[in-house]
Amino acid sequence: MADRLRAALTGQVITGASSRYKKSREEDWPTLLVGRTIMGVRSHGKNLFIDLSEGYIIYSHMLMWGSWHIYEPGEEWRKAEKLARLVLETPGKVAVLFNAPLCDVIPPEHLQDHKTSALGPDLLAPDFDRAEVWRRIQLPENREKELGEISLDQTVLTGIGNILKSEILFQAGLHPLKPAASLDENEFEDFINYSLELLQSSYEKGMRKSFIPDWMRPEITSFGFVYRRRNSPCHLCQTPIEMIRQGEMQRSTYFCPTCQPLAGPVIPFQERLKPLQQTLRPTG
Ligand SMILES: [Zn+2]
């Protein structure tokens, strides 16, 4: 979404702005926005930032249902007008934010107080800083948190959604109830490396194609290894998949208790795949 907005809007001047957010009336967003140039568009996890001239920023977060659309001037919208929360017009494009529950116009003097200033490192950023993630995991307020909860904590790291979380921990062989601060160096490296790999492939191929290797597809049709597979046998070891709820938000986490042991050695993902690989792709 950020890529599309960046390509369409960078360098354009905002000539019209309207919004249905209550905050927009209180803060007079049209006056804050019209006349400013769009300098760029960035994502940080699921947070999207449109950078404007003079240091102003439009912040939006899609949660599960928001989306930005780009239209030519006069083109018919693909969603109802009443669902539009913010409309930005430029001489060449119309950008419409539909349904997003979270949106702010941040003036430069409020940047430090905005909730996004506390965001942890972004897994998709070219300068992603894993040492900073480890430092944040060790903070007193995080030290007791379970790995399944930490994975979704935006103040520790950003980019992992609820579906990815279960699939990342499965491939890394890490039990979701382990306290994140108790991981040894290899386990932490696995957590980060599988997160980077799955997030990157989900960004490139779309999430639906990113979890199960292509050679498994003809035989195994499920979307991922564990997500929404409670009580079904693990594809790699036949143990029934379990589901628990974690964190303040009680988000679901799916895992295989054999592939992701709470204690003891972990069999690397590539090793766990081998028996199935030999059955599905006999060689020689
Ligand atoms: Zn298993």
Image (cartoon, rainbow, N blue to C red):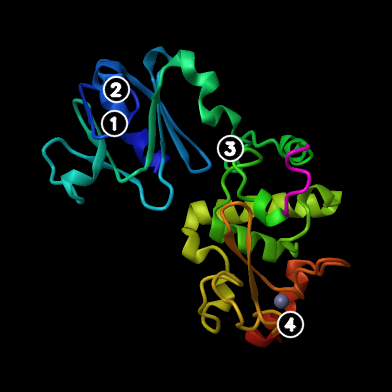
Amino acid type, label 4: Pro
Residue occupying image coordinates x 62% and y 45%: 153
**Residue 127 percent location from the top left of the image:** 64, 33
In the rendered image of this protein, does residue 191 appear above or below residue 211? above
- Main SS category, magenta section: loop
Q: Is mark 3 on a helix, strand or loop?
A: loop
- From the image, tell me which residue sits under label 3: 125
* Residue shown at the point (38%, 15%) measured from the top left: 53
Instruction: Residue 194: give x, y in percent of width and height.
Output: 68, 56
Magenta stretch: includes residue 142: yes
The N terminus - image quarter: top left
Q: Specify the quadrant of the image occupied by residue 142.
A: top right
**Residue 27 horizontal/vertical position (percent):** 31, 20
| For the residues bearing labels 1 and 2, Cβ distance under 8 angstroms | yes
Q: Position of residue 131 (x, y in %)?
A: 76, 36
Measured in 3D between alpha carbons, the distance from the residue under mark 4 to the one under mark 2, in whole angstroms, is 62 Å
Q: In this view, does 241 lie to the left or right of 179?
A: left
User: Residue 182 shows which numbered tag?
Assistant: none
Q: Is residue 104 above or below residue 218?
A: above
Which callout, 4 or 3, points at the residue further toward the start of the chain?
3
> Which residue lies under the disc numbered 1?
22
Q: Give the range drawn in magenta.
A: 140-146
Vertical placement of 35 versus 210: above or below?
above
For marks 1 and 4 on the same chain, the one whose residue lies earlier in the sequence: 1
Q: Earlier in the sequence, mark 2 or mark 3?
A: 2
Disc 2 residue type?
Glu
Q: Name the residue under label 4.
A: 275
Of mark 4 and mark 2, the one earlier in the sequence is 2
